[in-house]
């Protein structure tokens, strides 16, 4: 590869190209079957993901956003309820709470893991709290043992936003198996990247599964008889069929991400730039590195420096959710969550996808170090 060819954040084609023939065959199979809505491909995909996550039930849905929505709906979250979550996440986490008429109650993050500050969660509980919605941000599992403990003591539901953490593990099991529901996304940039939108919910609770399943199809049970108001939250049969081709390779994709993260870690540790360049800390070994996020006080300048050299980066996330215009009526002031706000100013995600060659990792690291040392 040319030493100054561009380095992208993601190259979906690099991951899909080796499977192209198989994917085309699956497309042909679904085309010929004429089964486009639910059916055997969806059922098989659900069973395969349930096995991977280590849960008794999985339900394919239309997106990660709808996974969150269906999970919260199945738990009966609605008007007047509070759901405790993080302000440093993708919008869908809090958006799905608000869409049900419930109130997102934000608490600050731990600056090392970027995940919910567990002590702050307990302090935010009120008589209206119904659920806790932690996010395994960037693929690093939250402290689910502590959160599970809090949920149990206060009789709260626990929903994992595992959109960035398929395949991540803890001592107690995989992400998505540690709460009442796990919510996953197959958006192309996620660890199991699909061919459009798709999502999935996991649970070990047969009753919750059944409610979620019914809600996925407009709450109908049987067809045309509605005890609940649901929606159309179905995953496409074609999407499920195509994802089944990629699922057996997830462990390899994850290994690639981890190897790239380890290479960055080593190069940044060697440079030893202190606060000028803070590499992400892996506090949970089962981290799957959906993103590799560094922090530096000169973030925007570093991003520009890298862009000039053909290196793409991304900012996850540039604005804390408590400061979003649509949440103004929640009444949070700037300064309410200093760690989340500081993170929005300092974080920069570097290319990490598994197919990225080691030489590219080295070029990115060298440019980051050169800038931060200069
Ligand atoms: C991607 C993502 C979602 C939403 O998933 P979609 O499939 O894009 O709807 C929710 N939460 C987090 C943390 C995400 O990263």
Image (cartoon, rainbow, N blue to C red):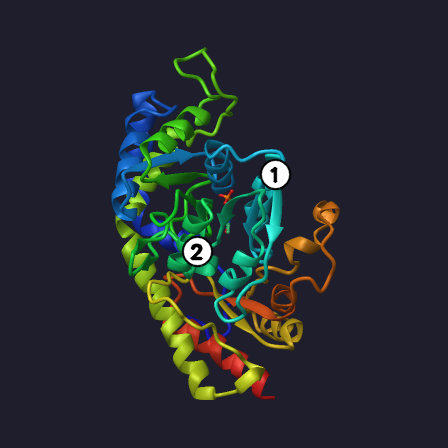
Residue 134 against residue 182 in the figure, above or below: below
| Label 1 sits on residue | 102
The extreme top residue here reads 224
Label 2 secondary element? helix
Q: How many marks?
A: 2
Work out whether 359 lies above or below 59: below
Q: CB of residue at label 2: within 8 Å of ligand 1?
A: no
Q: Is residue 288 left or right of residue 8?
A: left
Residue to which mark 2 is pinned: 147
Q: Residue at x 52, y 22 (%)?
A: 229
SS at badge 1: loop
Q: Can residue 125 be seen in this view?
A: yes
Q: How far from the left and from the top, in percent, is residue 270?
A: 42, 87
* Left-right relation of 163 to 170: right
Up the image or down, 197 lies above or below 347; here it is above
Residue 170, position in %: x, y? 32, 60
Task: Residue at 55%, 63% (x, y): give it.
Answer: 109
User: In the picture, which quadrant includes the C terminus?
Assistant: bottom right
Locate residue 306, reporting x and y percent: 58, 73
* Quadrant in the rendering for residue 106: bottom right
The answer to whether residue 373 is above or below residue 201 is below
Query: CA gap, disc 2 to disc 1?
Result: 20 Å
| Left or right for 347, reference 27 | right
Foreground pick, 26 / 88: 88
Q: Which disc, if any, is residue 71?
A: none
> Residue at the spot x=50%, y=24% of the render?
230
């Amino acid at each position: 590869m040319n030493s100054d060819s561009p380095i992208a954040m993601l190259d979906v084609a690099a991951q899909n190209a080796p499977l192209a023939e198989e994917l085309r065959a699956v497309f042909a199979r679904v085309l010929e079957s004429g089964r486009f809505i639910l059916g055997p491909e969806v059922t098989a995909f659900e069973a395969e993901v349930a096995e991977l996550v280590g849960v008794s039930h999985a339900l394919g849905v239309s997106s990660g956003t709808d996974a969150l929505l269906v999970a919260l709906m199945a738990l009966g979250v609605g008007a007047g309820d509070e759901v405790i979550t993080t302000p440093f996440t993708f919008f869908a986490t809090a958006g799905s709470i608000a869409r049900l008429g419930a109130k997102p109650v934000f608490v600050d993050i731990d600056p090392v893991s970027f995940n919910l500050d567990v002590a702050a969660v307990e302090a935010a509980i009120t008589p209206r709290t119904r659920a806790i919605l932690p996010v395994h941000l960037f693929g690093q599992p939250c402290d689910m043992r502590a959160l599970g403990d809090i949920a149990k003591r206060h009789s709260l539901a626990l929903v994992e936003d595992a959109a960035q953490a398929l395949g991540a593990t803890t001592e107690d099991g995989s992400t998505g198996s540690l709460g009442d529901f796990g919510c996953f996304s197959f958006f192309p940039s996620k660890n199991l990247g699909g061919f459009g939108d798709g999502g999935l919910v996991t649970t070990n609770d047969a009753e919750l599964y059944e409610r979620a399943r019914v809600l996925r199809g407009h709450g109908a049970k049987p067809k045309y008889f509605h005890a609940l108001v649901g929606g159309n939250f179905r995953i496409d049969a074609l999407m499920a069929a195509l994802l089944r081709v990629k699922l057996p390779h997830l462990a390899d994709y994850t290994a690639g991400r981890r190897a790239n993260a380890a290479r960055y870690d080593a190069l940044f540790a060697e440079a030893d730039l202190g606060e000028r360049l803070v590499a992400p800390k892996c506090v949970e070994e089962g981290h799957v590195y959906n993103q590799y996020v560094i922090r530096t006080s000169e973030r925007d300048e570093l991003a520009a420096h890298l862009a000039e050299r053909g290196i793409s980066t991304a900012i996850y996330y540039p604005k804390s959710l408590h400061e979003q215009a649509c949440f103004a009526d929640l009444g949070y002031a700037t300064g309410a969550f200093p760690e989340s706000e500081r993170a929005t100013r300092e974080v920069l995600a570097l290319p990490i996808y598994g197919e990225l060659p080691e030489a590219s990792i080295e070029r990115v690291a060298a440019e980051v170090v050169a800038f931060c040392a200069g």
